[in-house]
Amino acid sequence: MIVVTGGSGKLGRACVKDLMEHGYTVTSVDLAPPPGQHNPPLPGDVTFSRADVTDFGQAMAALSMIDERVEKVTGVVHLAAIAAPGQATNHVTFQTNTVSTYNVFEAARQLGIKNVVWASSETVFGIPYPNGPAYAPVDEGIEHPETAYSLSKLMGEKMAEQFCRWDPEQKIIGLRFSNVMEPGDYVNFPGFDEDPRSRHFNLWTYIDARDGSQAIRLALESDIKGAEVFGIANAQSVMTKSNDALLDEVFPGTERKRPLEDNESLIAIEKARRMLGYEPKYAWRDLVKS
């Protein structure tokens, strides 16, 4: 049994679908049911339970047993959060995200659940890059939170390190997802070329929700021990102009860690490729009719 917190969200829905298609028994835990959910569930519906994981008691219950819906949990995917900067006041964003993440990590520890995957964020790389990126492509060595939201995500990464120090058999993998997109979003992508600054805030990157789900599943299935963080993005940028030209125009003077391919992601995904076997499958250029 895999419990997915935040399973009704954009990435959560794709994650639940992917796990179920790969044979996993899944329970979604959220404050709102998945769109179109039937009560009682019909065949093909995910089992859903309402719980607020900012409350430790509810987090414990969600990962242990809710009636007979949740039992024998072998893995947790923690996606529940205030999903982006500006969606709530700073203190609410920081409190919600850090407390919910602590509660899930601590509940997993107390219940002996050794396999946790959670959503960190591309914002930890420095978004919105007020002074430009530290270097390009950005990678997991960068910790430059610029908002309460990104600080909350970095705190989650630091908590994961300590939980895994306490228990060397624990696995907590943080995935720094780029901006999550669904197929219906791609109709807007060709227009981004008109203004390089329209998507400069995250270095012109994105992640298809289905590829994000692939990364989650691979992280769950990996035999990694300890705390690890991975940048997760598509292999391509949203632009047709070369990366060097974009950086020279928008972020002049940016250090290149290595020669850049014209349209590669400026969030490095080499670590995820090497350690998880991650390979993006859904490129926007293949899904938009020319």
Image (tube, rainbow, N blue to C red):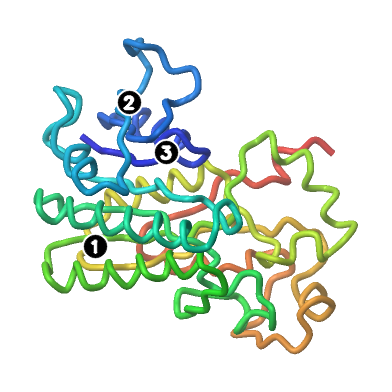
Which circle, 1 or 2, is nearer the viewer? 2
**Label 2 is placed on what type of residue?**
Phe
Q: According to the image, label 1 marks what residue? A: 224
Quarter of the rendering occupied by the C terminus: top right
In this rendered view, identify the residue nearer to me: 275 or 18.
18
Q: Earlier in the sequence, mark 1 or mark 2?
A: 2
**SS at badge 1:** loop
Residue 111, placed above or below residue 12: below
Q: CA distance from mark 2 to mark 3?
A: 14 Å
- Residue sitting at x 22%, y 68%: 226
Q: In the rendered view, would you say 61 is above or below 256?
A: above
Give the quarter of the image for residue 193: bottom right
Closest to the observer, 72 or 100 = 100
Disc 2 + disc 3, Cβ < 8 Å: no
Residue 176 placement, left or right of 174: right
The image quadrant of residue 281 is top right
Exactly how many numbered labels are in the figure? 3
80 shown above or below 27: below
Quarter holding residue 4: top left
In the figure, 97 relative to 216: above or below?
A: below
Q: Is residue 240 left or right of residue 26?
A: right
Residue picked out by circle 2: 48
- What is the C-alpha distance between the residues marked 3 and 1? 20 Å
Q: Which residue is mark 3?
A: 15
- Assign the N terminus to one quadrant of the image: top left
What kind of element bears circle 2? Answer: strand
